Amino acid sequence: MKTYLGTGRRKTSVAQVRLTSGTGHVLVNRLPIEEYFTVENYRRDATLPLELTKTNAQFDVFVNVRGGGKSGQAGAVRLGVARALVEYNEELRAALRPAGVLTRDPRMVERKKYGQKKARKRFQFSKR
């Protein structure tokens, strides 16, 4: 039984994904995906590469994800699954690339600057 690995990152989340041949079970941090991602959009986002390539029932997916919030973790899982699928079959890249699931989202939280309330918000300015 061959295992395909993929690492996905989004914001501050990191997901390590293992694909093994199976029946379509998805476990995230040893929990079924329905329990871990309670929001439907996050579940759909995480399994999008499997749906695009129509390999839902071919693989069991095991994910370890840490860091960030649920949204970032779902994005990290999506990238990890997509990379693992490309490792399984390079021809799937043609279906995944146009959907944008192989692209690492570079957006990160901007740091807070000194003399300001937040990254861009400033304290109220008084001229007099």
Image (cartoon, rainbow, N blue to C red):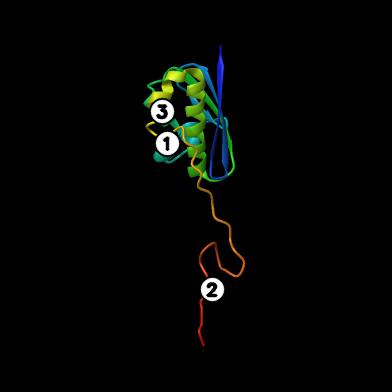
Earlier sequence position, callout 2 versus callout 1: 1
Is 59 or 87 nearer to us in this picture?
Answer: 87
Q: Which percent across, then down, holds residue 96?
A: 41, 28
Task: Residue type at mark 1: give it.
Answer: Asp
Separation (CA) of disc 2 from disc 1 = 38 Å
Question: Within 10 angstroms of label 2, few (less than 14), some, or many (20 or more) residues?
Answer: few
As measured in the structure, the alpha-carbon distance from the residue carrying label 3 to the one carrying label 2 is: 45 Å
Q: Residues within 10 Å of mark 1 (few under 14, many from 20)?
A: some
- Visible residue check, residue 51: no
Q: Residue at x 50, y 18 (%)?
A: 88
Q: Quadrant of the N terminus?
A: top right
Q: Which numbered circle lies on residue 45?
A: 1
In space, the residues marked 1 and 3 are separated at their CA atoms by 13 Å
The residue that disc 3 covers is 96
Q: Which mark is residue 71?
A: none
- Please identify the quarter of the rendering in which residue 6 is found: top right
Mark 1 vs mark 3: which is more N-terminal? 1
Residue found farthest to the bottom: 128
Q: Nearer the viewer, residue 33 or 5?
A: 5
